[in-house]
Image: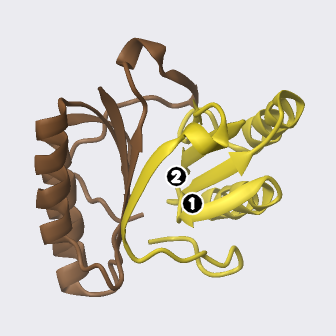
Chain colours: A yellow, B brown
């Protein structure tokens, strides 16, 4: 199934910047980065649970946010892109 | 229908910062901000076309990105939130 993962990590502190990098590095293992804080992941239910668990362990739930959108079968997802469409290197600075 | 709008606006320049503010201000007219660069909009097809047109006119397609996810009927959308869940004031600094 296609799962869209979006996140906001508060980067006001050094630990926040570390969390942001960690979240992105984990998401890269499960999907394609389509925007700085948006990943499209094709995963089975087990992988999805695992990803959710990993990310939940990384973030600070008091200041950060994760959202998971379950988009069903990948071929049925209706997505439209306007503007630049390029992968973002997870090792690049992630703070904008 | 529920449309998820996600965007990346390149804020390396002053004009980029202005575009980012403009995109957010327009999205606020159509939906709920669930993360810094993620809006959930409940719109009819006409409103959706209008929003898309407005945002496309604002962004610089060479460096910015818009994505629209068509999630169908709102009540059928499967969304999960972990961590902080609060509206973000569109007048607050939007650069993280």
Residue in view at x 86 percent, y 37 percent: A47
Horizontal side, residue A2 vs residue A34: left or right: right
What x and y, as percent, mark residue A5? Answer: 61, 44
What x and y, as percent, mark residue A59? Answer: 68, 43
A42, B88: nearer the viewer: A42
What x and y, as percent, mark residue A26? Answer: 79, 55
**Placement of the C terminus of chain B among the 4 image quadrants:** bottom left
Check disc 2 and report the residue beneath it.
A10
Q: Quadrant of residue B22?
A: bottom left
Please give the chain letter of the residue carrying mark 1.
A
Residue in view at x 55 percent, y 46 percent: A6
**Placement of the N terminus of chain B among the 4 image quadrants:** top left
A28, B92: nearer the viewer: A28
Q: Which mark is residue A13?
A: 1
Horizontal side, residue B38 vs residue B13: left or right: right
Please give the chain letter of the residue carrying mark 2.
A
Horizontal side, residue A30 vs residue B33: left or right: right
Q: Are marks 2 and 1 in contact (CB under 8 Å)?
A: yes
A3, A21: nearer the viewer: A3
A45, B10: nearer the viewer: A45
Horizontal side, residue B37 vs residue A53: left or right: left
Q: Establish if A3 lies above or below A45.
A: below
Whether residue B91 is visible: no
């Amino acid at each position: 199934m296609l799962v869209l993962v979006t996140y906001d990590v508060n980067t006001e502190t050094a630990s926040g910047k570390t969390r942001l990098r960690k979240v992105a590095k984990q998401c890269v293992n499960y999907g394609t980065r389509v925007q700085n804080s948006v990943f499209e992941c094709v995963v089975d239910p087990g992988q999805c649970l695992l990803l959710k668990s990993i990310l939940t362990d990384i973030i600070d739930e008091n200041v950060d946010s994760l959202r998971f959108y379950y988009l069903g079968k990948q071929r049925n997802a209706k997505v439209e892109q306007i503007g630049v469409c390029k992968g973002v290197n997870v090792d690049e600075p992630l703070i904008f």
